[in-house]
Amino acid sequence: MDFLRPATLAEALALKAERPGAVPIAGGTDVMVELNFDHRRPDALLDLTGIAELRDWSAVPGAVRLGAGVPYRRVIDELGGRLPALATASRSVGSPQIRNRGTVGGNLGAASPAGDAHPVLLATGAVVEAVSTRGTRMIPATDFYLGVKRNALAPDELIAAVHVPETGAPQQFAKVGTRNAMVIAVCSFAIALHPATGRVGAALGSAAPTPRRATAAEDFLADELGAGDQWESPTPLPDSTRRRFGELVAAAASPVDDVRGTAAYRRHALSVLARRTLDWAWQGYTGRGRPCA
Amino acid sequence: MRVNVTVNGVPRRADDVWEGESLLFVLRERLGLPGAKNACEQGECGSCTVYLDGVPVCACLVAAGQAEGREVRTVEGLADGGALDPVQEAFIEAGAVQCGFCTPGLVVAAHDLLARVPDPSDPEIREALAGNLCRCTGYEKILDAVRLAARRARS
Ligand SMILES: Cc1cc2nc3c(=O)[nH]c(=O)nc-3n(C[C@H](O)[C@H](O)[C@H](O)COP(=O)(O)OP(=O)(O)OC[C@H]3O[C@@H](n4cnc5c(N)ncnc54)[C@H](O)[C@@H]3O)c2cc1C
Ligand code: FES
Ligand code: FES
């Protein structure tokens, strides 16, 4: 096995083009587990932690360009205001030690259906910046997850960054696990309100072969909110709307029975998470519109 | 391959390192520092916790080559000569050590917490130690130890 330590992104891309089988390693919190347990024996590791370009985030128009190598710890500490749902999801990842190392880029690279960043990236409309010596491809999160632990990257591509829209409106993430710390999601859900476009983003994790959007639920809620002029003059949502939204989210899942939970439980829990996060988000939206007393 | 890494302030060199090897293996098997423990090798237990450039990480999940040119501080590096670190003292006094396997990792995690948050609340302590498992279930005493170390540092 070779250990490749590129110092720049350009160097990393040249190496990846030359050796598409080289496995990128960032925080190592997925890759090292596979190596330690002999589940993977790549002929080369491509260490990305020496590349300064991947380690930072910046504000770009309407979004945060989050470098693939920014660890969860910094998303939590530095981006809670701009990207509230991604920060919430990041707080729920593993343990402090895992959050100090693990990255959103690595979550995308692993593309596990249970990855906590994914529902947020889908609901907010994030776009993955994939780079290679051939150029840059901007891949919407919606098109990024192809199958269980399979993503849309070509063998010579690396993730440089993910562009996460700053919606300036309420967004929420919630996850069900068997305890409060160090849990892989039994199921997870994110909602993002997009008042500027009259849209709603809703996406689920750990309840289908890939993270996925609940598009029928998104359209239903956007129609309800649009028809009632709710974006302009928000009022509390009727129970029927909240319940239907939860049902449509649950219907979007294709869960399986596994050690973490049954399919039926996952569907039920998703409908609860959907309703609950909608309530939080909507309270945030109505509260913001209310004039100060 | 060869890995150069500063460990507890001393530049060290490890030779014949396998490219897929962990920093934990290098520390324990090549550099003779068995303080950080090897239990799960999958980030679940925290018994291998060390500082990497001042940040607590699971050494089992850091590739040896990723430590090249970096600073590592292990539990062995907390004591100042013969004098134990106050966190170590507090663990002993509070009876927070049973078999002791989890202790090095917990001590590093607690040391980091107290450096960042001198007067942590109970939820803050629990959160900071959430990545460290104790099979002897000494958690109450461990919480006592962290509270004791915090109190001492403040007075
Ligand atoms: C104890 C433990 C608890 C965990 N808990 C959670 C949890 O609660 N929620 C959760 O979502 N995950 C969890 N994980 C999984 C893991 O921490 C996350 O998936 C994390 O985001 C991986 O990031 P990393 O930087 O460590 O990735 P790495 O392990 O370095 O890489 C992961 C994958 O992405 C690829 N990759 C990395 N960077 C790039 C890049 N820039 N371009 C292309 N490919 C790239 C790698 O080749 C690899 O296939 C946990 C892991 C452990 C060990
Ligand atoms: S041995 Fe590293 S976390 Fe358990
Ligand atoms: S004292 Fe035995 S594992 Fe904690």
Image: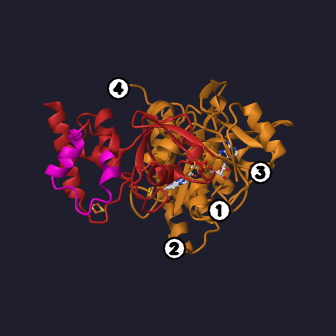
Identify the residue under disc 1. Answer: A252
Shade of chain A as shown in the rendered figure = orange
Q: Do the residues at pointers 1 and 4 share their chain?
A: yes
Of the two numbered discs 3 and 4 on the same chain, state the one appearing first in sequence. 3
Crowd around label 1: few <14 · some 14–19 · many ≥20 (10 Å): many
What residue sits right under mark 4 in the picture?
A293
User: Are discs 3 and 1 both within one chain?
Assistant: yes
Magenta region: B82-108
Instruction: Specify whether residue A131 is in view.
Output: no
Residue A85 relative to residue A144: left or right: left
**Circle 2 chain:** A
- Answer whether residue B91 is magenta in the image: yes
Q: CA distance from mark 3 to mark 1?
A: 22 Å
Label 4 crowd bin: few (<14), some (14–19), many (20+), radius 10 Å: few
Q: Nearer the viewer, mark 3 or mark 1?
A: 3
Q: Earlier in the sequence, mark 3 or mark 1?
A: 3
Q: Which mark is residue A152?
A: 3
Q: How many marks?
A: 4
Secondary element at tag 2: loop
Q: Chain of mark 3?
A: A
SS at mark 3 in the image:
loop
Identify which amino acid the numbered label 2 is placed on.
Val
Are discs 3 and 4 less than 8 Å apart at CB? no
Q: Are marks 3 and 4 on the same chain?
A: yes
Element type where label 4 sits in the image: loop
Query: Pointer 2: what residue?
Result: A259
